Image (cartoon, helix red, strand yellow):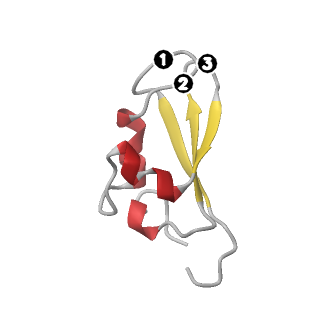
Amino acid sequence: MVPLYAARIGDLGSGDFVKVECGACGHEALIHPTALPGLQFQPHHLAVGLEQRLRCRECDVRGKAVVSIKWGNDSDV
């Protein structure tokens, strides 16, 4: 497990999720790491860098995301 400030997209395993909460409306979502390349995020990007690049699906506000990582119990990570 890597601390959030140092975690990169490439550090996420198959059992991990990026948890995103909107700071404006409180909407929460879990994003699987396999979906991140489709959103133009590369393995070298920091997970905390997602905060400014994501927008809420409910209220359409950009840059208010609060990002955390829900680490899975993979033994191969």
**Residue 25, label in figure:** 3
Residue placed farthest to the top in the image? 59
Give coordinates of residue 69: x percent, y percent: 57, 55
Amino acid at pointer 1? Asp
For image coordinates 40% across by 43% down, the residue present is: 50
For image coordinates 39% across by 48% down, the residue present is: 38
Tell me: residue 25, above or below residue 5: above
Residue 8 seen in the current view: no
Amino acid at pointer 3? Cys
Q: Earlier in the sequence, mark 2 or mark 3?
A: 3
Question: Image check: 20 left or right of 40?
Answer: right
The answer to which image quadrant residue 45 occupies is: bottom left
Give coordinates of residue 27: x percent, y percent: 64, 27
Which mark lies nearer to you, 2 or 3? Answer: 2
Q: CA distance from mark 2 to mark 1?
A: 6 Å
Secondary structure under badge 1?
loop
For image coordinates 40% across by 27% down, the residue present is: 63
**Residue 60, label in figure:** 1
Residue placed farthest to the right in the image? 73
Q: Within 10 angstroms of label 3, few (less than 14), some, or many (20 or more) residues?
A: few
Residue position for label 2: 57
Q: Are circles 3 and 1 on residues that touch, CB within 8 Å?
A: no
Q: CA distance from mark 2 to mark 3?
A: 10 Å
- 16 or 39: which is nearer to us? 39
**Quarter that holds the C terminus:** bottom right
Q: Within 10 angstroms of label 2, few (less than 14), some, or many (20 or more) residues?
A: few
Secondary structure under badge 3?
loop
Residue placed farthest to the front in the image? 38
Give coordinates of residue 15: x percent, y percent: 63, 67
Q: Earlier in the sequence, mark 3 or mark 1?
A: 3
Q: Within 10 angstroms of label 1, few (less than 14), some, or many (20 or more) residues?
A: few
Q: Are circles 2 and 1 on residues that touch, CB within 8 Å?
A: yes
